[in-house]
Every structure is written in structure tokens, then in C-alpha cells.
Amino acid sequence: MLKPERLTSEELSERLRSYEQRYGYSTIEFYRRFQTGELGDDDDLMMWAGLYHLYLTSLPVRQFMHRADSLCS
């Protein structure tokens, strides 16, 4: 069984930037086009969509951690 890979928020952002550079459009534009079925569903695009979903769902946690760090400083 494969152990899930853990990514820091910086690594996650870097991976999204890498896809943007490879395909030539922003993650937001990609996701809009992906959602409407314009781009298909090959493995690379599915990974990009999954990483963006992870980014979106982890945003509240990242914001909370940032606020907590600010309060401790």
C-alpha cells in the first residue's frame, strides 16, 4: 500500500505554478475549462484538478494557521 504524500502549502503552490507554466494558463482558468469538459480527463489534468481541489479545501486551515502564528509572535 502506498503511503500518501504530504505537501507543504509552498510545495502545493509550486506544483500548481508548474502546471500553469506547462499548459500556459492559470489554474483558475484551467479549472473553469476542466469543469465544463473542454479539456478532457487525462491523468495529468486529473492530477492538476486534484491539487487545486486540495489547495481550495486547505485554504481555511492555512488562514487559521497564519492567524495563529501572528498571535503567537
Image (spheres, rainbow, N blue to C red):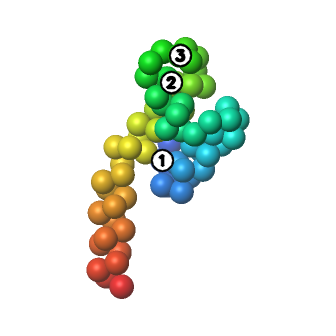
- As measured in the structure, the alpha-carbon distance from the residue carrying label 2 to the one carrying label 1 is 27 Å
Image quarter hosting the C terminus: bottom left
Relative image position of residue 2 (x, y in whole percent): 49, 32
- As measured in the structure, the alpha-carbon distance from the residue carrying label 2 to the one carrying label 3 is 5 Å
Note whether residue 42 is visible.
Answer: yes
Looking at the image, which residue is at 31% across and 82% down?
A: 72
Instruction: Tell me whether the residue at label 2 lies in contact with that at label 3, contact meaning CB atoms closer than 8 angstroms.
Output: yes
Question: Local crowd at mark 2 within 10 Å, few (<14), some, or many (≥20)?
Answer: few
Q: Quadrant of residue 60?
A: bottom left
Give the amino acid at mark 3. Glu
Q: Nearer the viewer, residue 2 or 45?
A: 45
Relative image position of residue 43 (x, y in whole percent): 58, 21
Q: Earlier in the sequence, mark 2 or mark 3?
A: 2
Question: Local crowd at mark 1 within 10 Å, few (<14), some, or many (≥20)?
Answer: few
Instruction: Tell me whether the residue at label 3 lies in contact with that at label 1, contact meaning CB atoms closer than 8 angstroms.
Output: no
**SS for tag 1?**
loop
Looking at the image, which residue is at 54% across and 57% down?
A: 10
User: In this image, 39 relative to 57: left or right?
Assistant: right
Farthest bottom residue in view: 73
Identify the residue under disc 3.
38
Identify the residue under disc 2.
33
Q: Earlier in the sequence, mark 3 or mark 1?
A: 1
Give the amino acid at mark 2. Arg
Give the amino acid at mark 1. Arg
Relative image position of residue 26 (x, y in whole percent): 57, 39
Looking at the image, which residue is at 48% across and 30% down?
A: 31
